Amino acid sequence: MINVHDVTKSYGDVQALRGVSFDVAAGEIVGLLGPNGAGKTTMIKILTGYLQPDEGTVVVDEIDVLDKPIEVQSRIGYLPENAPLYPELSVQDYLRMIADLRQVPPEDQTERISDAVVDTSLVEYLNRPIGKLSKGLRQRVGLAQAILHRPKLLILDEPTVGLDPTQILEIRKLIKRLAQNSTILFSSHILPEVEALCDRAIIIMNGRIRADARLADLEATDNAILVLQKRVGGVEATLKQVTAIDKVETMRTSDGVPSYRIYGKHGADLCPLVYDVARQNDWPLRELRRDARTLESVFNEMATAA
Ligand code: ADP
Ligand code: MG
């Protein structure tokens, strides 16, 4: 659905994108995740044909965006970073204007608008001027315009920025619902958002893709976590004698149960090994599991490595 290859873009001497490549398949919901200034909006404007890259190719739904931006724009739904809404227009009049702009045939407009406001739960606000709506409702109007022409692909630039926690949850729920029928690429600088919404994250920093992975893979580690029912002597020393084990760390826990994080050498699966050691030594085992990194820690590691 999206193929981006080696895209670069500078604003004067600011290099916003430095050789960005990624693909999104039909049906995926992908988060473009990165801190402010990473290049997310620049990438999205290029994807949607509103900005020309300096170099590289961008293909959306098998159409070259550089050759045919208008055709691409007619097929995608786009929620820009600052949705250009018209405060004096009612929701209904605004959506009708958008339907005209997108050349939805007049006989279909009423049905399309009705579907869009049902999907975004805006029915009761149809006659309200946009300027009188809360930020959360305005964001829903932005989503309603993005889905009006029933696009196969939705591109959303920081869809929850500036919303309060309740509004954020509502918009996330809505995006999840929209994902049942469309491919979605959305940008965010908020990790939990990406974790809540998608299976795959493309992490962008400083104009470069730093990771492109399924969240489960990004979060997986080879480390093991061992929790005992009560403290016993010599746990660390005993574990360190196992060849495959590199390092043992005592973890701080609030309930005071002895917990250890065990680091392995070269990708060994530690849990079976640790289990054997625990049995041989009669340790009162309470829990043994693979350690998972949070996306937060992945992100921080990358930020400090950058
Ligand atoms: P993000 O959306 O991830 O916050 P942007 O794509 O908006 O990042 O910006 C990437 C970089 O390009 C930043 O350093 C930003 O300051 C710079 N930039 C963005 N737009 C412009 C512009 N119109 N003129 C000059 N610099 C810009
Ligand atoms: Mg941005």
Image: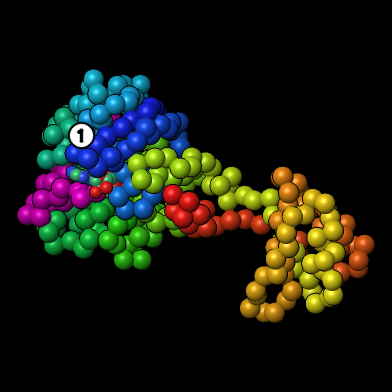
Q: Is residue 139 magenta?
A: no
Residue at image x 15%, y 39%?
Answer: 98
- Note whether residue 87 is visible: yes
How many marks overall?
1
Residue at image x 73%, y 52%?
Answer: 264
Q: Please provide the residue range marked out in magenta.
A: 75-96
Q: Position of residue 267 (x, y in %)?
A: 71, 45
Q: Is residue 94 magenta?
A: yes
- Note whether residue 286 is visible: no
Question: What SS does tag 1 mark?
Answer: loop
Residue at image x 29%, y 21%?
Answer: 64
Tell me the kind of residue under disc 1. Answer: Tyr
Q: Is residue 87 left or right of residue 168?
A: left
In the picture shown, does residue 33 fall above or below 254?
above
Query: Split into 4 quadrants, where in the image is the N terminus?
Result: top left
Mark 1 burial class by Cα count in 10 Å: few <14, some 14-19, many 20+: some
Q: Position of residue 91 (x, y in %)?
A: 16, 51
**Residue lying furthest left:** 88
Dividing the picture into quadrants, the one containing residue 291 is bottom right
Q: Is residue 45 left or right of residue 107?
A: right
Q: Position of residue 63 (x, y in %)?
A: 31, 21
Q: Position of residue 238 (x, y in %)?
A: 85, 64
Dividing the picture into quadrants, the one containing residue 254 is bottom right
**Residue lying furthest front:** 13
Q: Is residue 259 left or right of residue 57?
A: right
Q: Which residue is mark 1?
A: 50
